[in-house]
Amino acid sequence: MTVKITHIDTWIVDVPTIRPHVLAMTSISRQSMTLVRIYTSDGVIGLGEGTTIGGLAYGDESPEAIKLTIDQYMAPLLIGQPLIDPAAQLTPIRSTVVGNHFAKNAVETALLDIQGQRLGVPLSTLLGGRHRERIPVLWTLASGDTAKDIAEAEAMIASRRHNIFKLKIGKRDLRQDVAHVAAIKRALGDEASVRVDINQAWDVVTALRGAAMLADAGADLIEQPLPRADRAGMAHLTRLSPIAIMADEALRGPLDAIDYVKSGACHAFSVKPAQAGGLFAARDVAAIGEAGQIGIYGGTMLEGSIGTAASAHLFATLPSLRWGTELFGPLLQTEDILAEPLEYRDFALTVPAAPGLGLALDLDKINHFRRDAPSRTVSTPGRQENA
Ligand code: MUC
Ligand code: MG
C-alpha cells in the first residue's frame, strides 16, 4: 500500500535562556523555536526545527512567520501526497515558495528524519556518511559583563565542556570592546582560543582598526564584522586583516558562497543549514568553501536540540571542520525538550547514532513551553491539540 503524508503539526515553543544572551543588535532571554512534526500513514513521525534569534532582529523570518509559511504554504503541498524521497518531495515547495530558508530547512529536516527512520540509518548516512562521531563545540560568552564572562569561561574549562570561546562585541565603543576581549584572553591564557562575532555592527574603517587591535589582544578570528551586503568591504578587510575573517549572515546559500570565494571576501565560512535553506544547501556551501580553500565552521542559529542534532549530522559528514562548531544551543536553554538530551562532554558533542535524527521528544516539556499551551492560550476556540 502507498505510504502517504497524513498530517503536519507546527508549534512555537518558548524556552527561557540560562542568562541574557547579548548580541550587537539585540539581547535574548528566551529562545523561540518553531517545531515541525510530519506524520506518515505507516506511523513514522519526522521532526524539524526553524529557529532564529530575537524575533526579526537577526534574519527576515520570525518564528511566527516560519510557522505560518509551513502551515499555509508548505503543508498543503505535502499532506495527502505519497511519501517519496525528500529531494523529490521538496520540488513543489522549491518551485512555489521563494526564500523562506528557515522554514524550508525545518521541513527538509523532518522529511530526512522520516527517510532515515524508514531506512534504519542515521541522517548523517543519508548525507554521505561520517568523518567523525564527536564534534568540537565552542561556547559564546555574551553576558555583557567581563567578570561574569571570565567566571563562566573558567567554569566551562574546569568541567571540560568548552575551551574555545566566542565573544559577542560590536555594541560598545571599539576600545571598550577590545579591552573586554583582552581581559578575557589574559585571564584564560593560551589554552583557550578566543574569537569575536560583530554581527555586522562595524564599518570598514572600524574593522581595520579593530582587526589590528584584536590581533594584539590575542583573538584568533572575527566573525561577520561588516553588514552582509558589503562584500567589497569584506574582501578589502580579508586582504589586510592579521587574523581570520569569517562570513556568517552574508551566506544565504550556495550562490553567496561562490561569490565569497571568487571575491576573496573571507577566510572562513560559518555554515548554517537554516540560513542556507536546508541541509543539502548547507552541504553545498561547505563544499564550495572547501574547494576555495576556505576554513569551515559549523554555525548555529541557537537552535534547540532538534536543529542542533540535524546540524551535527551534517557537520559529521564534512571532510574538515577547521574552526570547529558552535552547536551549544540546547545548553543555553533552561530545559531540554528531548526525552534524552544530547551528550556534551570533553569539549565535544556526540552525534546521535539511532536512525533518522535519532531523537525522542519530551512531550510534557513541550506542552509546558508551547506558546499555545492550554494554560497560556489567549484564544484558540475549538482547536484540537494532538500532542
Ligand atoms: C551568530 O551570529 O553566530 C551563534 C552563536 C551565538 O552566540 O549567536 C549565534 C548567532
Ligand atoms: Mg555569527
Image (cartoon, rainbow, N blue to C red):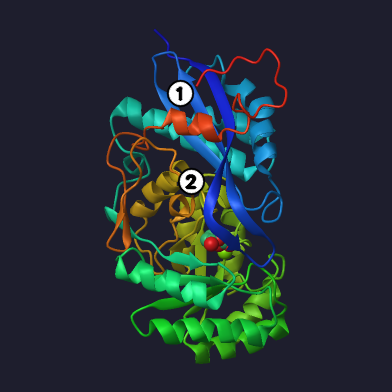
Q: Residue placed at 57% from the left, 22% from the top?
A: 78
Image location (x, y in percent) of residue 71: 65, 26
Q: Quadrant of ligand 2?
A: bottom right
Image location (x, y in percent) of residue 249: 62, 61
Judge from the rendering whether residue 190 lies leftward or rightward of residue 366; answer left or right: left
For mark 1, what is the residue? Answer: 84
Can you tell which mark lies on residue 304?
2
Q: Residue furthest front?
A: 375
Image location (x, y in percent) of residue 299: 49, 59
Mark 1 vs mark 2: give the one in front. 2
Q: Nearer the viewer, residue 216 or 386?
A: 386
Q: Nearer the viewer, residue 121 or 375?
A: 375
Q: Residue placed at 47% from the left, 53% from the top?
A: 329
Vertical placement of residue 218 versus 61, above or below: below
Image location (x, y in percent) of residue 340: 33, 39
Q: Nearer the viewer, residue 172 or 18?
A: 18
Within 10 Å of the Cα at label 2, are there few (<14), some (14-19), or many (20+) other Cα atoms?
Answer: many
Distance of label 1 from label 2 (alpha carbons): 28 Å
Label whose residue precedes the other's in the sequence (1 or 2): 1
Q: Is residue 236 visible?
A: yes
**Amino acid type assigned to the residue bearing label 1 in the image:** Ile
Q: Residue placed at 38% from the left, 85% from the top?
A: 189
Q: Residue placed at 45% from the left, 61% from the top?
A: 326
Verify CB contact (< 8 Å) between mark 1 and mark 2. Answer: no
Within 10 Å of the Cα at label 1, are there few (<14), some (14-19), or many (20+) other Cα atoms?
Answer: some
Q: Nearer the viewer, residue 253 or 305?
A: 305
**Amino acid type assigned to the residue bearing label 2 in the image:** Gly
The local secondary structure at tag 1 comes to: loop
Vertical placement of residue 230 versus 254, above or below: below
Q: Is residue 248 visible?
A: no
